[in-house]
Amino acid sequence: MAAAVCSASVLFSLLVGNVGAVLRRQVSLPTRLAPAWTWQPVRFVVAVGVAGTLATALSAVLGVGHPYWAMVAAVAPLTARGVSRQMVRAGHRIIGTLLGLVTGAALLVLGLGPVATVLVVVVLQVLTELVVGRNYGLAMLFITPLALLMGQLASPRPAASLLLDRGVETLVGGAVAVAIVLLEQSLRRHRMRHRS
C-alpha cells in the first residue's frame, strides 16, 4: 500500500510539474530543438552519493539515522542558479536549519498528541509556502520543525537524537554542496587559464 501511495504521489507530482510545459508546446512549437545536455544531473548524483556515504559512515560513529537529510541538504543549494546564489542557499540551509532546531526542540518537548501535531504541521506548511519563494533561510525555520514533527508522527524517536540527526546531517550535506561548488569554480578557473 505504501509503495502504491508513493508511486501515485510521484506520478501526480510529475503531471502537475509538466502541465505548463505541455501547454506551452501546444501554443508554439519550436522548429528545431537544441540539444539540452547539462552536467546538472551529474552534480546531483555526486552530491547525493557523497553526502549519503558520509552520513551513513557517521551513523556508525554518532548513531545518526537519517542519511537522506544529508542528501537533501547537499542537493538543495545546487538547484539555485549561479555560484553566489548556491553558496547563499547552502548558508541559508545550514543556518536556517540550526535555528529551526530551536523551534523544533520546543515543539517536541511539548509532547503534542497526534491531532495537535497534525494541526501544527499544517500551520508550519502554510508558513513555509508563504515565505519559501522570498527567503529560503527563513523558510528553513518552518521546514525543520515540520520535518521533525512529521517524522515523529510516523515513527517516534527520542527528541535529542532526532535533533542531533537533523543538525549533523544538514551540516554534512551543506558542506558537500559548498565543496562541489568550490571545486567546480576551481576547475573552471583552471580551464580558463589553460585556454588563454
Image (spheres, rainbow, N blue to C red):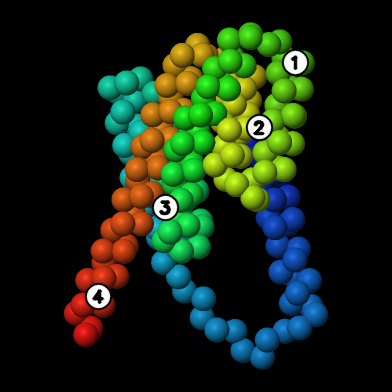
**Which residue type does callout 3 highlight?**
Met
Question: Residue 189: image x %, image y %?
Answer: 26, 70
Give the numbered dot on residue 2: 2
Nearer the observer, disc 3 or disc 4?
3
Query: What is the count of numbered marks?
Result: 4
**Residue density around tag 4, few if under 14, some if 14–19, many if 20 or more, within 10 Å:** few
Secondary structure beneath dot 4 equals helix
For residue 106, above or below residue 18 = above
- Disc 4/disc 1 C-alpha distance (Å): 56 Å
- Disc 2/disc 4 C-alpha distance (Å): 48 Å
Which residue is the site of mark 4?
191
- Disc 2/disc 3 C-alpha distance (Å): 36 Å
Q: From the viewer's perspective, is 50 left or right of 26? A: left
For residue 91, above or below residue 123 = below
Which residue is the site of mark 3?
87
Give the numbered dot on residue 116: 1
Question: Residue 41: image x %, image y %?
Answer: 45, 60
Q: Nearer the viewer, residue 51 or 92?
A: 92
Q: From the viewer's perspective, is 73 left or right of 192? A: right
Question: Residue 21: image x %, image y %?
Answer: 71, 69
Nearer the observer, disc 2 or disc 3?
3
Nearer the observer, disc 1 or disc 2?
1
- Disc 1/disc 2 C-alpha distance (Å): 24 Å
Q: Looking at this rendering, what residue extends furthest in the left direction?
A: 194
Q: Are marks 2 and 4 in contact (CB under 8 Å)?
A: no
Residue 149 shows in the view: yes
